[in-house]
Image: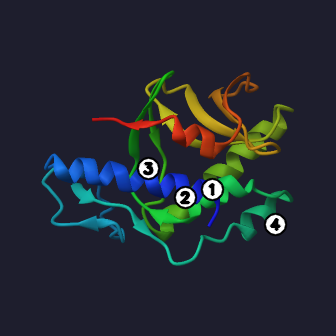
Amino acid sequence: MSEVTQVFTLLLQNARTTAESAGNSWFSYADPELASPCQYGDVSGDQQVRWWPVMRSECQDFSNLEHGLEFSLHPDLQAFYGHCYGGGLKVQHQRGNAELLMVWHQEDFSRLQQNIIAHILMKRRLKQRETVFFAVTDDDDIMLSILNETGAVYLEHAGCEVKEQLAGSLAEFLQQLTVAE
């Protein structure tokens, strides 16, 4: 098991334990077309459903994406996106709030790969270093990304070269987070 998988799993487990002990649940919008392995209970009137993370027995396969783009996706990203199903996990970092992106179900994994392809092609068109996003922030124009060649975590302004490094690795970054209330 990779370090990212271990740290992310621990973050999820601790967050769930804290939420359950406080009598809280996590909610996400339900996909009306396809249920997620991580959702439970009934869908509410506003189309929200409770969820807890569900670990996959095998990591998702990114070989089609890698073959299509003729590059290797950083192993930290494969571990992060590939080991569990979930909604978005709201977290806090010293630089602000964020939501860690997670795969809701297998169809969502396909959409994620399409978005990664579009992002990489944009970076190539702009002649910028290749990054892959893993979280969104309160500011619609800023995301958290990994520089694919090194695995370092950066704040990324949409359409711009990354400049502000937050951590040397995704595992290091995940250890800096607390789950938002």
Mark 2 nearby-residue class (10 Å; few <14, some 14–19, many ≥20)? some
Instruction: Say which quarter of the image contains residue 73.
Output: bottom right
> Which mark is in front, 4 or 2?
2
In the image, what residue occupies the spot 54% across and 42% down?
174
Q: Position of residue 119 (x, y in %)?
A: 69, 43
Instruction: Say which quarter of the image contains residue 157.
Output: top right
Mark 1 nearby-residue class (10 Å; few <14, some 14–19, many ≥20)? few
Q: Earlier in the sequence, mark 2 or mark 3?
A: 2
Residue type, numbered disc 2: Gln
Residue holding disc 3: 11
Query: Which structural element holds mark 3?
Result: helix
Residue holding disc 4: 67
The answer to whether 77 is drawn above or below residue 85 in the figure is above
Q: What is the C-alpha distance between the residues marked 4 and 2?
A: 27 Å
Is 74 left, or right, of 89 in this rendering? right
Residue holding disc 2: 6
